[in-house]
Image: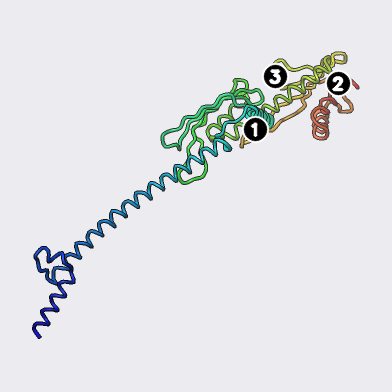
Amino acid sequence: MAGKQVGNIRQQIDLFGKEDEALGQTPSVLSRPVQRKTLTQGLDQDLTQLEKEINRLTELVRQKTETVSRKSQELYELQYGERRQKTEEELVAEIQLLQSQVERTKEITGVSIQKYSKETDETGKNSHLEVEGSVLGNQFSVQFDVEIPEEENCVAIRNLNLLVEDSILKKLHDPLLQLSDNNALGSFFSLMEQFSRWNIYRQETFHHFTEKYPDIVSTDSDEETVLLLQNPQISESLTLCVMWSFTIDPLCRFHPDLRLKVIVHKQLLEADQENVIKEAPQMFQKMVDLYGIERGIDAMVQLMSGG
């Protein structure tokens, strides 16, 4: 019985291989788990190294993919996008379109920009701007600061400084000062546009009547907004003055003001039995309201000429 047990034990030992016998050693059953643990550690190291290599290759593939995508996008933009090399015909067409838009803007607003500069601080939220140009021929220069508040979606204008010609400053001093204090840049351009159009229209109208009726119509040498109507053949004691001025309301809005003033000697006024001279201002205002400025002035010219 004991002999069989010994044989079984030897058979179990032989199952682990003959290599141990060649070394003259008799390994025990307890030695095998130690060898298996060593093998497992080697596999773990290999797997860890393999995972690192896979991660490295994956990152390289990702980088290469991004590079290829970026290069492809750049090539597409160069060939088809805004960065592509444009032909001479396309450049000429774009310049012509830009010029057309500038002229259209100038025609609508009367504003022509001749010089523009902008300085922005490091934060990118505060800028100082200087703009020079003209509004229907009247020169201007504006300087102001622009601030973009962090919690607001609009810009704020600060420190508005307005510069205009002396002749305009003389007529618009108070409203321009008010607009500057209120940083009302848009209202400044609106006021300049309305004033300039009024001034051009008045000059053209006065010129028309002085050319058409040179013996009766003349302009006042001291006040350019006054048109004088006189008929020396009848009497120099009667003068009709077409006074074409303007008013500015508290909101700095422009309003043309056209009135007729009669300068007449007392004796001639007393001789006017039908009150034609006395009622001339009311008649003129009614003609202007119904038929326009030109018809109103023409009616007064006919009155002076006896037509």
Residue 110, image quadrant: top right
Residue drawn at x 12%, y 78% is 7
**Viewer-side residue, 128 vs 275:** 128
210 left or right, relative to 91: right
On the question of residue 102 being in view, the answer is no
Q: Do the residues labelled 2 and 3 touch (CB within 8 Å)?
A: no
Q: Position of residue 171 (x, y in %)?
A: 63, 25
Where 91 falls versus 223 (above or below)? below
Q: Could you classify mark 3 by the number of other residues whose Cα lies within 10 Å: few (under 14), some (14-19), or many (20 or more)?
A: few
Q: In which quarter of the image is the N terminus?
A: bottom left
Res. 304 mark: 2
Colour scheme of the picture? rainbow
- The residue labelled by disc 1 is 248
Asked which secondary structure carries label 2, the reply is helix
Asked which secondary structure carries label 1, the reply is strand
Dot 2 or dot 3: first in sequence order is 3
Q: Where is residue 276 in the image (x, y as percent from the top left)?
A: 86, 27
Q: Do the residues labelled 1 and 2 touch (CB within 8 Å)?
A: no
Q: Position of residue 147 (x, y in %)?
A: 48, 37
The count of marks equals: 3
Residue drawn at x 22%, y 60% is 41
Q: Position of residue 72 (x, y in %)?
A: 51, 41
Where 72 falls versus 199 (above or below)? below
In 3D space, how far apart are the residues under numbered discs 1 and 3 (Cα atoms)? 19 Å
Dot 1 or dot 2: first in sequence order is 1
72 left or right, relative to 205: left
- The residue labelled by disc 3 is 223
Dot 1 or dot 3: first in sequence order is 3
Q: In which quarter of the image is the C terminus?
A: top right
What amino acid type should be assigned to the residue bearing mark 2? Met
